[in-house]
Image (tube, rainbow, N blue to C red):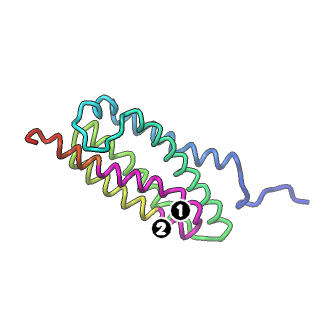
Amino acid sequence: MNSKKSPSSFSPLAAAVFTLFPLLWGFLSSRASGDILSVYASLHQPPLSPPGAVFPVVWTLLYLLMGFGFYLVIREGIKKGADLRPASASYLFQLLLNLLWPIVFFRLGLRFGGTVLAVLLAAAVLQMIREFGSISQRAALLQLPYLLWCLFASYLSAGTAVLNLGWI
């Protein structure tokens, strides 16, 4: 009897690695972005802006969902013999935008540039959901909170950009 697992069976170690990678990515992004919470607190905020303490909690959950979703895509894709390149490319592209947004918005103080990136990030997440869905519906569904948060972040970015022009 062969005791080897098939590449499509659940692997706790692989699931942990895929799930923890975006957490590490987010940590690096926050370090590269400077003191985000202090900058956030110093800005005029639009209605519905949550307290700064909400962001690390939400992003941690979103990064966990993102990573586990990608793990499911890889696992299911191998099982189905699917082309993993489009899903992988969309995943990596949105991670890049995810890294750039806080750097542009908070560290560089380019509020409108950050808003453009936030909108692009939401579009990239939508594309990632489409790509994930072609391989794993569960993985795609796990990304819906991320899409909703990115849409909300786009609103917050735009509102903050307008409210902090100096002449409003």
Quick check: 1 above or below 113? Answer: below
* Residue drawn at 10 percent across, 42 percent down: 168
Residue reaching furthest left? 167
For mark 1, does the 10 Å Cα neighbourhood hold few (<14), some (14 to 19), or many (20 or more) residues?
many
Which residue has dot 1 on it?
Answer: 140
Q: Residues within 10 Å of mark 2 (few under 14, many from 20)?
A: some
Question: Residue at image x 58%, y 68%?
Answer: 135
Q: Main secondary structure of the magenta part?
A: helix
2 or 1: tag closer to the N-terminus? 2
First to last magenta residue range: 129-155
Q: Nearer the viewer, residue 125 or 149?
A: 149
Amino acid on which disc 2 is placed: Arg
135 horizontally vs 36: left or right: right
Residue at 27 percent of width and 44 percent of height: 47
Instruction: Tell me how far mark 2 sits from mark 1, CA to CA.
Output: 7 Å
State the quadrant of the N terminus. Answer: bottom right
What's the residue at 52%, 51% (across, down)? 66
- Residue 64 placement (x, y as % from top left): 54, 46
Please determine whether, in this image, residue 140 is positioned above or below residue 56. Answer: below
- The image quadrant of residue 76 is bottom right
Quarter where residue 75 is shown: bottom right
Mark 2 and mark 1 residues within 8 Å of each other at the beta carbon: yes
Label drawn at residue 31:
none
Judging from the image, what secondary structure is the residue with disc 2 in? helix
Q: Name the residue beneath numbered marker 2.
A: 130
Q: Is residue 160 left or right of residue 79?
A: left
Question: Percent x, y for residue 121?
Answer: 36, 55
- The residue furthest right is 1
